[in-house]
Amino acid sequence: MTLSNEFVPSRIKSTDPLHEQWNLTLAEREVFRRRAREARLAKDAAAAGLGGTPLHPVNVPMFNPDDLMPQLTRNGLSTLSLFSGGGGLDLGFDRAGFDHQGSWEILPAAAETLRRANPSWSVYGGDDGDVREVDWKPWRGNVAVLHGGPPCQPFSNAGKQRGASDPRDMWPEFVRAVLQTRPEVFVAENVAALASATFSDYVEDNIIRPLERHYQIRKVLLQAYEYGVPQVRKRVVFFGFRTKTLAKRWAAPSPQYRRVGDERSDLPTVVGAREALGLPDIGFDDVSPTIRSGLSGPRHTTSILSSVSAQRRFEALQIWPNGVAATRDAASAYVTKNGHFRLSVADVALLQGFPESWRFAGATYMQLGQIGNSVVPPVAYSVASSVAAALR
């Protein structure tokens, strides 16, 4: 075996023992290094007004996530949100008519995003947003739904899948909150790997067994593009119902769209990433690969690239996923070497199903991290709507 086919470590030193480096060959790492160097030089040139004539005008998106989440009449049902992040679940439940009672999020920038989105919400951020320090008993009996997305890094296929041995595992805290508040329904989202055989014992020991005496628990896998969002993003959602009657009344969200080329149903075809972003027709379009969060690693990143296969898909779409720009104007001014369209934060948010009105706080990498960690809002909306129907 030649050196180019052997896995080699990254040159970037990491002080974080939980950082999960990709297993890449020397040849693959060199491709990424070259792209990073070229992107850095092109970015500096664009900022200095020397980036060359823009190849792509500022794009005008043709996709509006608001159309997938029409505001429903207030239903009088209250919610608490844990691990709120950029607000995907919060937004979905709000649009479905629920009354927000509080959000807990440890990242200050993400908490600020929630406050900007809805100044009337009660948002606990930073140290105040650390769910490990919260006594939930004052909310006991006063909450219809408790929802959240515990950190997915302990279970993600992109990591080392340490599960319960990973200090980022917050499922025990979610379970504690459920048992102390006793909501009518709980909803919890995570990566699809948590529903695999790899973590069947973990799920049984840490989720099912502690809660099944009090809740009827259901588990479903939901795919983002099946709910109108132009992205491949499969996630598992756990539903817990206080009574058998509630569980029987509940119907799982059903797909509303199909992917291009899927002839197995007569559902409408989901919009492709290029069409969604308002880009010219190149004879090929498809949904975006899964958007990666850049909040873990040895350094901050503005790349949303999740894998080598995702890189190939972005290349086919002629979309540049590395070095996402802060604004669409900045993205237009940046001329990529291969001539592909450069993404902005607003474009990435759109591909994740956030409406233009939802403005993220923090530096560019932090905004992208919030987006990549979020539950897709139209999926959250379908989840919330299904719960509302059962509670009526």
Image (cartoon, helix red, strand yellow):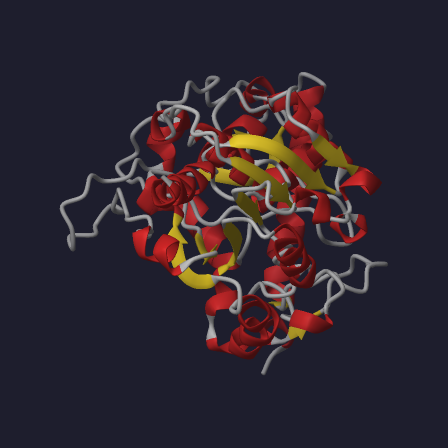
Q: Is residue 21 in sight in this rendering?
A: no
- As rendered, which of 40 and 133 lies closer to the eye? 133
Where, by quadrant of the figure, is residue 260 drawn?
top left
The quarter of the rendered structure image containing the N terminus is bottom right
Q: Is residue 273 in sight in this rendering?
A: yes
x 40%, y 25%: residue: 66
The quarter of the rendered structure image containing the C terminus is top left
x 50%, y 49%: residue: 184
x 44%, y 51%: residue: 233
Residue 379: x and y, percent? 41, 42
Residue 317: x and y, percent? 39, 41
- Residue pushed farthest bottom? 1
Residue 351: x and y, percent? 45, 36
Say how many tags the image has: 0
- Residue pushed farthest front? 141
- Residue pushed farthest right? 15
Residue 310: x and y, percent? 47, 53
x 36%, y 44%: residue: 386
- As rendered, which of 207 and 390 lies closer to the eye? 390
In the rendered image, the vertical position of residue 311 relative to residue 193, given as above or below: above
Where, by quadrant of the figure, is residue 154 drawn?
bottom right
